[in-house]
């Protein structure tokens, strides 16, 4: 087998590994803060769900109560990247962080369990970066094996 065929099979193998790995996100629904279930429950996302969506709502209880305390409500789930961005855009005008008003914010992140924190510092890796890394690894392997 020549070196170019070896490189081709290596790239194919790396591609298959990345496609087969399951994506995971933390999940919870309307929890009062980023605690308990929001930090301990993980779900393997469905095929095509490539992002983790976090929604943060500040407000009083869902039913009207005079003088009710305002608090945070946190929801986390798996989502398709496009849907996640659409929800984020929809919430943007209401993401005011004004303490006496009800508001809603959302965040999207890419990567396994990237939504542990409410505001994630997880990188959004692009396919061009992945291809660059694969190309460099392939050249190194080719140089080692094909001397």
Image (cartoon, rainbow, N blue to C red):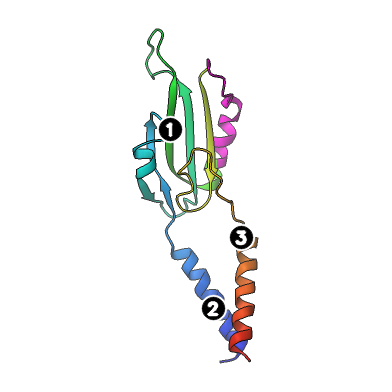
Task: Evaluate if marks 2 and 1 touch, with contact meaning CB atoms under 8 Å apart.
Answer: no
Element marked by disc 1: strand
Which residue lies under the disc numbered 3?
127
Position in image of residue 95 (x %, y %): 57, 27
- Considering only order in the chain, which callout, 3 or 2, is on the residue closer to the N terminus? 2
User: Is residue 96 found inside the magenta-colored segment of the image?
Assistant: yes
Element marked by disc 2: helix
For the C terminus, which image quadrant? bottom right
Which residue lies under the disc numbered 2?
10
Extent of the magenta region: 85-100
User: Is residue 1 found inside the magenta-colored segment of the image?
Assistant: no
Q: Residue at x 44, y 62 (%)?
A: 21
- Determine whether, in the image, residue 126 is placed left or right of residue 68: right
Q: Residue at x 61, y 90 (%)?
A: 146
Position in image of residue 28 (x %, y %): 37, 38
Q: Residue at x 58, y 80 (%)?
A: 8
Count up the numbered dots: 3
**Magenta segment, principal secondary structure?**
helix
Q: Nearer the viewer, residue 46 or 118?
A: 118
Which residue lies under the disc numbered 1?
74
């Amino acid at each position: 087998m020549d070196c170019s065929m070896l490189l081709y099979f290596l790239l194919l193998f790396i591609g298959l590994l990345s496609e087969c790995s399951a994506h995971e996100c933390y999940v919870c629904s309307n929890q009062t803060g980023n605690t308990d279930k929001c930090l301990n429950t993980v779900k393997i996302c469905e095929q095509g769900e490539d992002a983790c969506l976090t929604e943060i709502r500040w407000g009083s209880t869902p039913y009207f109560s005079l003088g009710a305390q305002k608090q945070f409500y946190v929801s986390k789930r798996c989502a398709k990247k496009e849907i996640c961005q659409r929800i984020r855009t929809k919430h943007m005008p209401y993401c005011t962080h004004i303490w006496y008003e009800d508001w809603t914010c959302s965040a999207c992140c890419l990567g396994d369990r990237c939504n542990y924190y409410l505001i994630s510092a997880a990188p959004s890796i692009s396919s061009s970066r992945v291809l660059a890394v694969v190309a460099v690894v392939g050249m190194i392997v080719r140089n080692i094996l094909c001397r």
